[in-house]
Amino acid sequence: MAEVDLAALADAGAFVSHEHQSHLAELVRADGWRIDAAGSALVFLDAEGRERSVRAHFIGTSSPEDGTWLWGWDNINAFPKAFVKQGERVRALGERYAIREFTTATLPLEEDLPATLLKAVKAVTGVTAHFSAATGNGGTRAWLLLDDPYLALPAPTVARAIAVLTSALAAGGPVDHRRALVAWTQQRGVTLTRVDDDVEELALPDGALQVRFDVADRIAGLGKRLRAAPEPEAAPEPEAPAPVESLERPEPSPAPRADAEPTAEEPRRGFLQRLLGL
């Protein structure tokens, strides 16, 4: 199997990562937080000053002094298994799909490496929010994935899609705009249709968004088309109730097999195979 390009994975996670970090900034105050490694949680004050606890997964540390990134799955601090579970999953996915950076315990630290790794990790795990915490040991920072219903993204809309794309691109954005857009629509459950070679259309709950690409395949323009409100329908005439003797008793649903394998990984595996062309 050919080695998977880390930059391609980072592009696939770029838009959803940017969207989720923007959403997270509205929910989590910059002060008043602590990491509860024993409970696999990040505890913080929300925008109203109330304490909240969300599920956290230790992914790795970056140390400017040592010039290294250290993966959490190496677990030199003997953290609880639940706290490093997603990190171990990242290594397993790295082994499965030949992602060298995911299976090398220590990497040379470059300026953008943590951000690149986190976007790639989000693409392969489907956990798309993260938190970076100072450790108190020089410039070393701990990087956590956050996975909790409280942090769930709002439903995608035309206005939200425009805000995500424009702000992500203004912040530097992905290298491959098409890959990033396709991945975002798959991650957010949005239907994407090719209108022609230069235009893709997103079908969103409140309308459609057309995305135009330039000759270099970069996003060059957005055009929205909001859905008109439907005309109210006349109330249907009530139907006479069926006689009792004509009602059929539904067959009971079969009980799930006790030995059935969990299928939670299957959608993610299919997404990765489509994304990476495997």
Image (cartoon, helix red, strand yellow):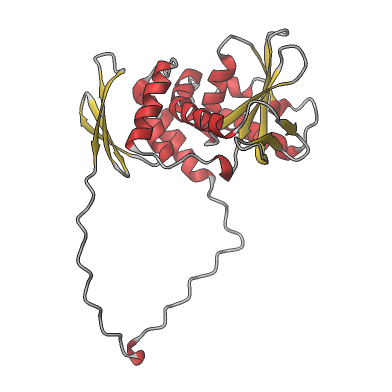
Q: State the image quarter where residue 132 is shown.
A: top right
Is residue 263 in view from this perspective? yes
235 or 186: which is nearer to us? Answer: 235
Q: Residue at x 41, y 22 (%)?
A: 167
In the image, residue 41 above or below residue 141: below
In the image, residue 141 above or below residue 43: above
Q: State the image quarter where residue 211 is shown.
A: top left
- For this orientation, the residue located farthest to the right is 78
In-image side of 59 versus 246 (left or right): right
| x and y, in percent, of residue 246 in the image | 32, 88
In-image side of 249 versus 96 (left or right): left
237 or 62: which is nearer to us? Answer: 237
260 or 30: which is nearer to us? Answer: 30
| x and y, in percent, of residue 185 in the image | 37, 35
- For this orientation, the residue located farthest to the front is 48
The quadrant the C terminus occupies is: top left
Q: State the image quarter where residue 48 is shown.
A: top right
Q: Residue at x 28, y 13 (%)?
A: 216
| x and y, in percent, of residue 225 in the image | 23, 36
Figure label count: 0
Q: Which residue is drawn at 41% across and 31% down?
A: 275
| x and y, in percent, of residue 243 in the image | 32, 90
Is residue 95 in view from this perspective? no
In the image, residue 95 above or below residue 112: below
In the image, residue 222 above or below residue 65: below
Q: Which residue is drawn at 19% across and 67% down?
A: 234
